[in-house]
Image (cartoon, rainbow, N blue to C red):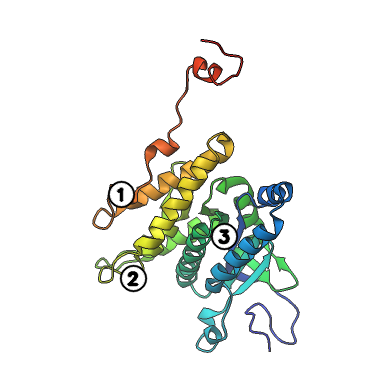
Amino acid sequence: MSKNPYHVEGQEPSLKRSVLAYMDILGYNEMIRESQSNGTQEKMLRKIHSALSKSREFLDPKPWQYMTSENFSYAVKAFTDNIVLGKPVRNDARQELSWIFNRLSIFQLDMVIEGFFIRGAISVGDAYVDDIAVFGNALTEAYQGECHIARDPRIILTNSAVLVAKENIQQYSDPPYPPPHFSDILCDSDGQWFLNYLNCVLIAGDDHGPFYDDLASHKEKVEERLNEHRGNPPIWSKYTWVANYHNYFCDMHPQHFDESHKIDVELFRASPKPIIEIAKQSPYYHD
């Protein structure tokens, strides 16, 4: 019997109100073309396959997750660099949002550590997800959000998800404890709410401390991309966003992180240059 929560044995497929995430790997097509041009297709295939196999351990349903409660039921659909995760909603969607924020944070950080940056969007609406089809207005909204709004390597919340998150926060009336989602999401300078995925390095709590190695690996991969794409402003700017986010996250937790954990701002500071500096690089220049 199928464990997919969208599939009911003996019944026609039907839509369920769901939290749905649509994600892809930033620059995936460019990676393929580059590996074709320099003869490293086999190496790139193994690298991508290994990263997805490892990181999707936090996304793919496991048998034990269906044994206790429907709260754990969800479905994953993946094709090359596109990944869709759907989780039917019960009640006010607070648990489903919190659950998906946690899972996607670990997935996104693990993928960055493996060298692949993720862009995506989360929506709340009607959806159906199985191995044959992914359908519904939740998919349409998340897809449009990923393609046209996310822009940078971030997983944003579409309008429907923001509305539900706000309702959850406003309904929370227990002052001694923080409201739901308060540490899971941040609001960007353009007004978009996005997943605060680095927060998962603090998942062990104050007693055990942060996962410093994971944050250091994140820093290393971002610095690599900044250096690699310095001569390509449209791409380079996407990694400056990640660098700013990395440093902002460190500043949010001064009890754990200092300047040594942050990315050197000189790596992502864009400054104009006198044209004479460019001219001097020409073989035709004579002083």
- Which residue was labeled with disc 2? 204
Circle 3 packing at 10 Å, graded few (<14), some (14-19), many (20+), is: many
Cα separation between marks 3 and 2: 28 Å
Circle 3 SS class: strand
User: Would you say 274 lies left or right of 119 here?
Assistant: left
- Seen as rendered, the residue at the extreme top is 287
Decide which of 217, 64 is in the foreground and name it.
217
CB contact under 8 Å: marks 3 and 2? no
Q: Nearer the viewer, mark 2 or mark 1?
A: 1
Q: Which residue is mark 1?
A: 260
Residue under label 3, please give it.
123
- For the residues carrying marks 3 and 1, which lies nearer the camera in this image? 1
The earlier-in-sequence mark between 3 and 2 is 3
Which is more N-terminal, label 1 or label 3? Answer: 3
Q: Residue at x 57, y 60 (%)?
A: 123
In the rendered image, residue 200, in percent from the top left (x then y), is placed at 40, 64
SS of the residue under disc 1: helix
Q: Looking at numbered disc 2 in the image, what kind of residue is underneath it?
A: Ala
Left/right placement of residue 71 relative to residue 33 reads left
Question: Residue 139 placed where, x, y %?
Answer: 65, 61
Where residue 180 sits in the image (x, y, percent)?
A: 38, 65
Residue 176 visible to the viewer: yes
